[in-house]
Image (cartoon, grey):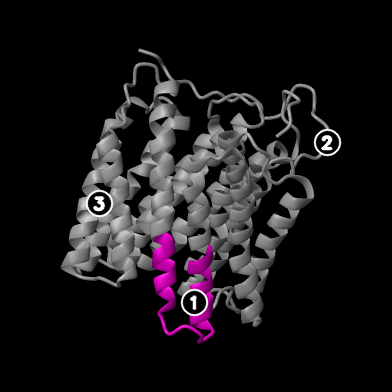
Amino acid sequence: MMKFIPIEEPLRPAVESTGFALWQLGFRPFFLLASVFAALSIGLWAVQFAGWLPRPYLSGPLWHAHEMLFGFTLAVMVGFLLTAGRNWSNRPTPTGLPLAALALLWVAGRVLVLTPFGWAAAIVDAAFPLAAAAALGVAFWAARNRRNYFFVGLLVLMSAADLGVHLSQLGVLDLPAWLGVQIALDMVLFIMAVMAGRVIPMFTNNGVPGAGAVRHAMLDKSALASVLVLLAADLLRLHGIALAAIALFCAGAHALRWAFWKPWTTWRTPLVWVLHAAYAWIPLHLALRAASELGWISGSVATHALTVGAVGGLVIGMMTRTARGHTARPMRADRFDIACYALVLTAALVRVGLPLVAPAWALHAVICSAALWSAGFGLFALRYWPVLTRPRLDGKPG
């Protein structure tokens, strides 16, 4: 039996590469910005939540959710899609000044939501996913890459959901702002389910010889369709037993899908098992959401199973893999990568598990989970800063 020994190869080349490469491909600025933002924003929110911050960082839980979805998660999505989109279409995606302008638009959105300028924040914030959709759409249209057109549509829908939150808070829309957050959560869930189905079985079979991970077309379609049904139910503002039944069916479909990918074969390969561990939070989130609809648990627990567990785990796993692969570094996780995985996934266990078994310890769970999360993404930012800002080791563009 093969014995796993963590590889600790240096991320820096034997001969230092020269030049500044941050604007050479989409993953570089957005992974760096997202990781720094994830560490700082959650840290500040936890201090505010505990009552230790003299002046609030965000004006309430709604804006905490907003910033994690339309700030952190959307930045990672855009960075990944601009990078993968170039491979899918064999057409260029923004680099240089256009990429820097797109990153600046994202930064402006994060700053403006902290100011009294509500209309400016709404316009700039909603413009970011639209600009990314346009950039991606140009590449896909030129290549007639119809298979991936829906990503452009999803970015447009994310912009609409973001704008809806802002307009609700401005008193323009007579709809609850949390509806926009929930719709965005469902869209993020759908995007993760699509991308995981494409890459996790492939990475499993490539990284673990003989793993035998398989995809079943009908099961995949059923699992993805169930998420769209859940999204429609949320749009219709369905609640109670009906929504619980939809969520439970969805949970079963995704759990079965995950089982066919043979997660138990990957435990010696951290670059792969982190993706399986993260995906396991999707059926767990859906089961917890059903329980919350029946009034058995807090809805916050179900939401954080998705955001901290599934989103956080998949993001940290894909960021390390993408950063290594697209900078010509070895596709093996070192001890720093494994530490990042452990910190983020443990943050999810604490944030979800502790309030379930000991509700009185919910505040402690938030603070401890935030510290673990911030440490995980902070470590990624420090470790990969030189990787993301320097040229590829093989001298190729990107």
Q: Amino acid at mark 2?
A: Gly
Q: Amino acid at mark 3?
A: Cys
Quarter of the image where the N terminus is located: top left
Residue at the bottom extreme, as displayed: 171
Considering the whole magenta stretch, tell me its main secondary structure: helix
Residue at the right extreme, as displayed: 19
User: In the rendered image, which residue does mark 3 sit on?
Assistant: 250
* Quarter of the view holding residue 319: top right
Q: Amino acid at mark 1?
A: Gly
Q: Is residue 113 visible in this depiction of the protein?
A: no
Q: Residue 19 got which mark?
A: 2
Name the residue nearer the viewer: 179 or 297: 179
| Sooner in the amino-acid sequence: mark 2 or mark 1 | 2
In percent of the image, x 23 and y 39: which residue is there?
A: 256
Q: Please identify, in this view, whether the residue under mark 2 or under mark 3 is nearer the observer.
A: 3
Query: With 173 as the anchor, is 55 left or right in this view?
Result: right
Which residues are drawn in magenta?
159-185
Quarter of the image where the C terminus is located: top right
| Sooner in the amino-acid sequence: mark 2 or mark 3 | 2
In percent of the image, x 54 and y 62: which residue is there?
A: 70
> Which secondary structure lies at badge 3?
helix
User: In the rendered image, which residue does mark 1 sit on?
Assistant: 60
Q: Residue 102: x, y in percent?
A: 69, 56
Q: Magenta includes 173?
A: yes
Q: Is residue 91 visible in this depiction of the protein?
A: yes
Q: State the CA–CA distance, disc 2 to disc 1.
A: 42 Å
* Quarter of the view holding residue 90: top right
Q: Residue 81: x, y in percent?
A: 56, 45
Q: Residue 282: x, y in percent?
A: 33, 49
